[in-house]
Structure formats: C-alpha cells, structure tokens
Image: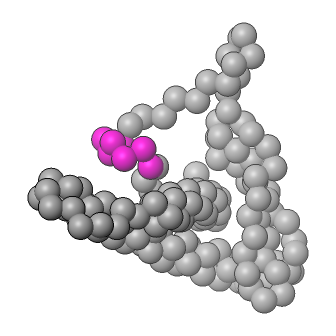
Amino acid sequence: MNEFTHYCSRYYKLTQLLNKRITRLADLLANVPLYRGETSLTDIDAIITYYRDIEERKKKADQTATDLKTTGKIILTIMEHFEIPPYTALTGQIPDEVEYEIYADETQTLHITKTKDLAPVAENGTIMLIKPSSGDDSGEEEE
C-alpha cells in the first residue's frame, strides 16, 4: 500500500474504531452500577471492576482519538503540499472491506465516508468476512 493511501485507510479505520469505542463507553456509563449499601465484598468488587473497565476503555478511546488526530494532520499536510482544493473528494479503498471518499473542508476538517462495501460474497450470496483474532477477547477491534 502506498503512503497516502495508507494514511487515508488508517484514518478510515481509526474513525470507525473511535466511533465504536465511544458508543461502548457511553453504554457503560449509562449503566454504571452504584453502591447501594451492599455489604458483600464480592458485590463491591464487581462495582470496582466495572469502574476499572470504564477507565481502561476511556484510555483506549483517548489513545484512538490521539492517533486519529495525528493521522489527520499528516493527511492534511499531504493535501496542502499537493494544493488539493477544499471539498475535492479523493477516493480510496481497503481491499476486501470498503471503498471510501475523503476530503477536507475550508476549515481543514477531514470528512471520510464509506461509499461501497467490498466484502467478498460467497456463492450463496452470504457475505463472508474473516478476520484473524488479535488475541483480545474484549470484542473490540484494535488498531
């Protein structure tokens, strides 16, 4: 994969990952267990574990946001170098996943949207997408 394509594809993946992490974090925060006079240490430990999980997921979301911002700056620098005008839609793809468009507006804000799914389709019409496990059992994608 070439350099600019790499950064744009990474930006797309980080955007998707950050959205997923923010949604999961909001769900966790909406369901925070409160201490209600429990006397069992096990019950209190469960509450503590829940809060620790929120802290860990917040750190991951913050790191993803930082990575997204850094990648975005690189993309904007390349666009500026080539004098690509605002709102010029550039197209790219992540093989066997998605096709996307990316552009910067006049305020140097990047916008990226999926334009097409490229997931391979099995003979019976069922979409088949097989990804290797990262070894993390949290159910979240890692970047």
Query: In the picture, residue 134 is in which quadrant?
Result: top left
Q: Is residue 2 visible?
A: no
Q: Is residue 79 magenta?
A: no
**Lateral position of residue 18 relative to residue 8, left or right:** left
Q: Which sits in the foreground, 45 or 119?
A: 45
**Lateral position of residue 18 relative to residue 123, left or right:** left
Query: In the picture, residue 118 is in which quadrant?
Result: top right
Residue 54 placement (x, y as % from top left): 36, 65
Residue sticking out furthest to the left: 41
Residue 11 placement (x, y as % from top left): 60, 64
Q: Is residue 41 visible?
A: yes
Q: Quadrant of the C terminus?
A: bottom left
**Lateral position of residue 12 relative to residue 79, left or right:** left
Q: Which sits in the foreground, 14 or 95?
A: 14
Q: Is residue 135 magenta?
A: yes
Secondary structure mostly seen in the magenta stretch: loop
Q: Which sits in the foreground, 87 or 48?
A: 48
Residue 74 placement (x, y as % from top left): 59, 77
Residue 102 placement (x, y as % from top left): 76, 65
Point 27% across, 62% down: residue: 47
Point 74% across, 39% down: residue: 117
Residue sticking out furthest to the top: 124
Query: In the picture, residue 63 is in which quadrant?
Result: bottom left
Span shown in magenta: 134-140
Q: Which sits in the foreground, 59 or 134?
A: 59
Point 70% across, 44% down: residue: 98
Residue 110 vertical position relative to residue 38 in the rendered view, above or below: below
Point 65% across, 36% down: residue: 96
